Image: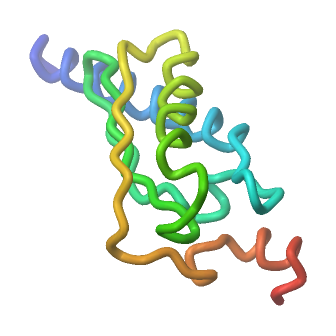
């Protein structure tokens, strides 16, 4: 393996490890209206991590009229920034595709009595 390939592999391993840490952190953030974390609730659509430690997240809310729409993405960014290896985080609030109960994990559906 060349030095370049080794470096590339290390960067990919760093990105994947950091992505896992970010997801674990997202599982500590709970929806203000439903007592379930936002990751398993299906509100997180994308988590991208750069090799430099930048984190980009696309998330949605259960409804466009959600009263925390203006503040919740900032709370999620702050939680992600608390991960030591994260350089910075940017959360984009997206509405397409619209969130539905189909976005929830089976465990959450069971917890909420939907299965």
Q: Image quadrant of residue 27?
A: top right
Nearer to the camera, 26 or 31? 31
| Image quadrant where one finds the N terminus | top left
Is 10 left, or right, of 80 in this rendering? Answer: left
Q: Image quadrant of residue 29?
A: top right
Number of numbered callouts drawn: 0
Residue drawn 26% across the image and 22% down it = 51
Q: Height in image: 35 above or below 53?
A: below
Give coordinates of residue 69: x percent, y percent: 50, 52
Residue drawn 59% across the image and 26% down it = 79
| Image quadrant where one finds the C terminus | bottom right
Q: Height in image: 83 above or below 94?
A: above
Give coordinates of residue 2: x percent, y percent: 11, 17
Is 86 left, or right, of 2 in this rendering? Answer: right
Nearer to the camera, 65 or 31? 65
Give coordinates of residue 25: x percent, y percent: 63, 33
Residue drawn 26% across the image and 16% down it = 52
Q: Height in image: 106 above or below 84?
A: below
Residue drawn 49% across the image and 55% down it = 44
Is 82 left, or right, of 88 in this rendering? Answer: right
Give coordinates of residue 89: x percent, y percent: 38, 26
Please say which color scheme the image uses.
rainbow
């Amino acid at each position: 393996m060349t030095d370049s390939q080794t470096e590339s592999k290390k960067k990919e391993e760093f990105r994947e490890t950091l992505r896992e840490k970010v997801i674990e952190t997202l599982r500590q953030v709970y929806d203000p209206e439903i007592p379930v974390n936002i990751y398993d609730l299906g509100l997180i659509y994308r988590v991208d991590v750069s090799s430099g430690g930048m984190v980009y997240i696309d998330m949605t809310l259960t409804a466009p009229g959600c009263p925390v729409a203006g503040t919740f993405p900032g709370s999620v960014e702050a939680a992600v920034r608390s991960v030591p290896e994260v350089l910075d985080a940017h959360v984009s609030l997206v509405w397409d595709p619209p969130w539905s109960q189909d976005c929830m994990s089976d465990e959450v559906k069971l917890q909420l009595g939907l299965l």
